[in-house]
Image: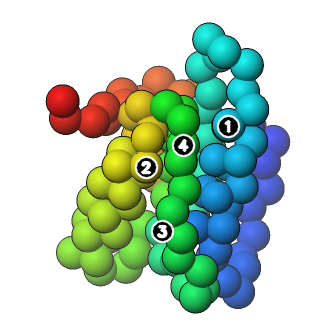
Amino acid sequence: MRALTLGPTDATDIVGFLVKAGDLLATAPPGSQPVVVMTTDLQHNTDRDEAFDLHGAQVLLLVFQADDPTTARELRDGWQSRLLSAGASSVTIRDAMESADQVLDAPAVSPVK
């Protein structure tokens, strides 16, 4: 992750990514502790919208923040809720501009039981 080079893109298919992640997680060995790491602006802008199952994976979102604080908070809250509802065991949301050490030491948000 430390050597990752990020660049702009024209579209963000968050759901497509999560569907593929769910397919891969479905074949994870029993007892494993899978982690999904996604760098995103949280602005899903394709027509794709389908269910996905995260099979108990921990999710780490490295987020490029929206310019408007209210929009940023709504996007974070909406995706956090959707990921937990889709079976994530926890969701950690961090600013993509933070250092790798800061990100990897971040506390997770677990679903409300």
Q: How far is the residue under mark 2 from the one under mark 1?
A: 12 Å
Q: How far is the residue under mark 3 from the one under mark 1?
A: 21 Å
Of the residues under marks 2 and 4, which one precedes in the sequence? 4
Q: How far is the residue under mark 2 from the one under mark 4?
A: 6 Å
Q: Which residue is drawn at 53% across and 76% down?
A: 49
Q: Residue under circle 2?
A: 86
Query: Looking at the picture, how far across and down is residue 2, in whole percent?
Result: 74, 37
Of the residues under marks 4 and 1, which one precedes in the sequence? 1
Q: Do the residues labelled 3 and 1 touch (CB within 8 Å)?
A: no
Q: Can residue 80 be seen in this view?
A: no
Q: How far is the residue under mark 4 from the one under mark 3?
A: 17 Å
Callout 1 amino acid: Leu
Numbered disc 2: secondary structure? loop
Q: Residue at x 75, y 70 (%)?
A: 7
Q: Residue under circle 4?
A: 54
Of the residues under marks 2 and 1, which one precedes in the sequence? 1
Q: Is residue 30 visible?
A: yes
Query: Looking at the picture, how far across and down is residue 29, in whole percent?
Result: 73, 19
- Please give the label number shown on residue 42: 3
Where 104 falls versus 93 (above or below)? above
Q: Do the residues labelled 2 and 4 touch (CB within 8 Å)?
A: yes
Of the residues under marks 4 and 3, which one precedes in the sequence? 3
Tally of numbered tags: 4
Front one among 58 and 75: 58
Q: Residues within 10 Å of mark 3 (few under 14, many from 20)?
A: many
Front one among 86 and 70: 86
- Please give the label number shown on residue 25: 1
Callout 2 amino acid: Ala
Quarter that holds the N terminus: top right
Query: Looking at the picture, how far across and down is residue 42, in whole percent?
Result: 48, 68
Numbered disc 1: secondary structure? helix
